[in-house]
Amino acid sequence: MRYLTAGETHGPQLTAIIEGFPSNVTIDFEAMNFQLHRRQKGHGRGRRMQIEKDTASIAGGVRHGRTTGAPIALVVENNDWKHWTSIMNIEEQPDTDEGKRRVNRPRPGHADLNGGLKYNQRDLRNILERSSARETTMRVACGAVARQLLEAFGIKLASHVVRIGEVEAKSPQLPIDELIAITEESPVRVTDPEAEAAMIAAIDAAKADGDTLGGIVEVIVEGAPVGLGSHVQWDRKLDGRIAQAVLSIQAFKGCEIGIGFEAAKLRGSSVHDEIQYDPEKGFRRASNRAGGFEGGMTTGEPIVVRGVMKPISTLYKPLQSVDIDTKEAFTAQVERSDTCAVPAAGVIMENVVAWEVAQAFMEKFGGDSLEEIRRNYENYLKQVESY
């Protein structure tokens, strides 16, 4: 199971094709588009979120509400395209800066300069249009489809914000459904009212200063069975694959599983999860410091993943840069941006994690139809129960 995405931030549309998705999975279109709506929410988002009302349409692979086993084609139209039709036109345009809105002053922290050098582009718009975080719209759409497969087997995902700037929220100890309900009502996706108020104030202060804020988000996956992923090859370890997916999100600079970097401070007796056996529930862990993984495989405990997002690179008080034409020092160009996208980043992270878990689920219980997968899944659960 895999997907590819295409499209630019100010182009006519964003597109994705999912291949290898099983047949007979009922697609809830409202649930799919709800994930896109969630991605656009959060205190600190910029004006682009007021322009775009993202809705994915399915152009192939689904008939009468069910997947057919054929590739699934997803499309999200860009409402802002009407303001960029001459600038982003695929046909040759007059060679003027006015016609092209050329970018020649790379922004520190973005892909602009590296991409321009790599692809030999003198207009850095050809880099920033694709490297923009708007690309994650389609990754959320693909994750929204994948999580509907997971939900058919009782696997749920949630996210919450751990930190924004210097403000850290209390760790929620809540059932996953309650966590989802509370964070959906919070503009910064926390369950801690004091932290919420402090985070909003910090975002507003950064905006007033023309600056930006980053933070930490946590994703929790409940219901994943033991044995997803594998220890036998490095690239089959599911925790490693999840970490790669998290770090592929624009502006993410770190990932940890379970207690993560905290483990470096502790002795082994305070890190590893003791094994217990319950006649009703089978093998289980007394704690979950490992975040649901041992040896690159799921343990049956909740998967717990944290991602670190740096402050967004586009500043309204821009940093120093160099004009690629004259080689003279200038302040970097400013593109429309957010002050803080950490709450939305949690939604993106949920959906990229959902994709990786669904992909590993398909590898483990593979079949061409939902019915075949369910038979394989139920037989495996019987094997685990009788172990």
Image: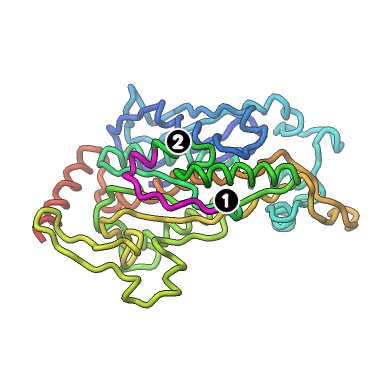
Residue 333 screen position, x and y as percent: 80, 46
Q: Which mark is residue 184?
A: 2
* Residue extent of the magenta highlight: 168-180
Which residue in the structure is indicated by mark 1?
164
The total number of labels drawn is: 2
User: Is residue 184 part of the magenta span, yes or no?
Assistant: no
Q: Residue at x 62, y 40 (%)?
A: 44
Callout 1: SS: strand
Q: Residue at x 39, y 39 (%)?
A: 180
- The answer to which of 179 and 66 lies nearer the viewer is 179
Vertical placement of 131 versus 78: above or below?
A: below
Residue 55 screen position, x and y as percent: 51, 27
The reply, left or right, for residue 137 in relation to residue 124 is: left
The reply, left or right, for residue 262 in relation to residue 134 is: left
The reply, left or right, for residue 69 in relation to residue 279 is: right
User: Is residue 174 part of the magenta span, yes or no?
Assistant: yes
Residue 231 falls in image quadrant: bottom left
Instruction: Name the amino acid, label 2.
Output: Glu
Callout 2: SS: helix
